[in-house]
Image: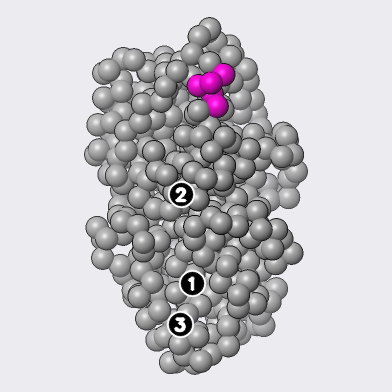
């Protein structure tokens, strides 16, 4: 029986448009949000995305102390069930083939830079000879063709796949597994457990719980929250909102959600329209780099700043610091881009790896805001604070220069 690695995947067809599982729509970069006009109307009910079992699992995982090196979060794991990989053990440097959904936004670009710096380390150690990469540019059809190209080429010792969407990519992932070579899936899931390991942070419900609890703790019953969402139909994003919405309802918080497409102009319009109706005490976001536009809408209207959740993208962190907001930066751990290559290194050595490699996902709070701003001083606004590449050879210059391989 197949084990679904992503809940409600049959509804994820819209994800072929998406630039993230992670997380951003920085207007300074060309991205696929331009391919689909932003919806700015109030959204429909999201209860179809709520899964109590997964909600409870991720809620519990938030409190688990990860196993692994304290200073290497990309090697940590939560509640791991280990898988034997001895059948894949062999000597010599290996060629890796990477089918990537895209590098069309700053979250993915930050991870892509980090991944390539990790690759250099593994090439120098003799674990990996090269990584051939094909970029699907946010297209299901292109990524399916990319995976089939790698299979037909027949020169891959192992596969890494960051799926563009869940259901559409499942058959192609299964075909890669049928080659007998190890397959590592990360970031977004698919509807098969044929991969040796599936790598991801805790998940969307954990994000929703972290953010909703923060807002509830800092607001009063009856207060109004505007929820700004990117696009519908992506499991991780839908679960973020489904989890938060449940908690808002239970706490008596009035929460109204809109799809913005991540467009700063649309975000400002949504906030301005709501402020014209009355006071807004909170802002919730399922991705954070549009957060600065939301803050600016309050400034433009001459209103008090809201209690707010954004993300660990530096433009938000810097605006948070400058304004003195009551805020939280949830995280969809960008350092996960290192883990697939390190997992393949272990697999090629015949070492055990988790069947589902759950990485830590800890928000940035007011208590550690200054620490992360200092750690990332000199980085561009589109950089992600918890990128986890400080011990890689190109640090900090390649991230500062935004050298996209």
Task: Residue 331: name its quadrant.
Answer: bottom right
Along the polypeptide, which appears first: circle 2 or circle 3?
A: 3
Between residues 372 and 73, which one lies in front from this camera angle?
372
In this figure, which residue is indicated by the disc labeled 2?
401
The number of discs equals 3
Residue, far top: 91
Residue name at image x 29 percent, y 44 percent: 137
Between residues 13 and 68, which one lies in front from this camera angle?
68
SS for tag 3?
helix
Residue name at image x 69 percent, y 63 percent: 370
In this figure, which residue is indicated by the disc labeled 1?
292
Count residues near mark 1 (Cα–Cα under 10 Å), then give few for <14, some for 14-19, many for 20+.
some
Residue name at image x 54 percent, y 61 percent: 314
Give the answer, above or below, for where 388 lies relative to 156. below
Q: Position of residue 126 (x, y in %)?
A: 53, 16
Magenta stretch: dominant secondary structure:
helix
Between residues 145 and 393, which one lies in front from this camera angle?
393
In this figure, which residue is indicated by the disc labeled 3?
297
SS for tag 1?
helix
Query: In whole angstroms, how far apart are the C-alphas of marks 2 and 3?
Result: 30 Å
90 with respect to 217 (left or right): left
Pick the quarter of the image with the C terminus.
top left
Give the answer, above or below, for where 383 lies relative to 290. above
Q: Which mark is residue 21?
A: none
Tell me the magenta residue range: 121-125
Between residues 21 and 105, which one lies in front from this camera angle?
105
Q: Nearer the viewer, mark 2 or mark 3?
A: 2
Q: Nearer the viewer, mark 2 or mark 1?
A: 2
403 with respect to 285 (left or right): left
Does 123 appear in magenta?
yes
Query: In whole angstroms, how far apart are the C-alphas of marks 2 and 1?
Result: 22 Å
């Amino acid at each position: 029986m197949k084990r679904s690695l992503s809940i409600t995947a049959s509804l994820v067809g819209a994800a072929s448009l998406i630039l993230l599982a992670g997380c951003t729509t920085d207007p300074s970069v060309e991205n696929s949000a331009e391919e689909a006009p932003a919806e700015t109307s109030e959204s429909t009910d999201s209860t179809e995305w709520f899964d109590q079992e997964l909600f409870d699992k991720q809620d519990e995982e938030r409190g688990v102390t990860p196993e692994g090196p304290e200073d290497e979060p990309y090697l940590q794991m939560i509640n791991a069930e280990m898988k034997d990989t001895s059948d894949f053990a062999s000597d010599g440097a290996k060629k890796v083939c990477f089918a990537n959904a895209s590098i069309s936004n700053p979250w993915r670009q930050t991870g892509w830079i980090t991944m390539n710096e990790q690759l250099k380390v593994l090439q120098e150690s003799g674990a990996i000879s090269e990584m051939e990469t094909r970029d699907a540019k946010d297209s299901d059809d292109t990524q399916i063709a990319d995976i089939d190209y790698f299979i037909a080429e027949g020169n891959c010792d192992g596969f890494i796949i960051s799926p563009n969407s869940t259901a559409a990519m499942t058959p192609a992932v299964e075909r890669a597994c049928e080659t007998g070579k190890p397959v590592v899936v990360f970031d977004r899931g698919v509807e098969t457990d044929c991969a040796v390991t599936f790598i991801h942070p805790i998940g969307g419900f954990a994000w929703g719980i972290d953010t909703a609890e923060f807002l509830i703790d800092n607001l009063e019953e009856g207060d109004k929250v505007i929820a700004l969402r990117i696009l519908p139909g992506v499991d991780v994003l839908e679960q973020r909102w489904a989890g938060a919405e449940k908690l808002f309802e239970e706490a008596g918080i009035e929460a109204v959600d809109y799809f913005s497409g991540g467009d700063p102009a649309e975000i400002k319009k949504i906030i301005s329209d709501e402020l014209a109706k009355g006071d807004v005490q909170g802002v919730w976001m399922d991705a954070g780099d549009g957060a600065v536009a939301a803050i600016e809408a309050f400034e433009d209207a001459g209103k008090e700043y809201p209690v707010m959740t954004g993300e660990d993208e530096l433009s938000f962190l810097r605006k948070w610091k400058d304004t003195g907001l009551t805020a939280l930066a949830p995280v969809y751990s960008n350092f996960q881009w290192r883990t697939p290559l390190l997992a393949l290194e272990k697999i090629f050595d015949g070492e055990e790896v988790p069947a589902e490699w759950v990485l830590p996902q800890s928000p940035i709070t007011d208590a550690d805001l200054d620490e992360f701003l200092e750690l990332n001083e000199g980085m561009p606004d589109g950089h992600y604070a918890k990128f986890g590449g400080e011990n890689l050879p190109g640090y900090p210059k390649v991230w500062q220069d935004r050298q996209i391989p």
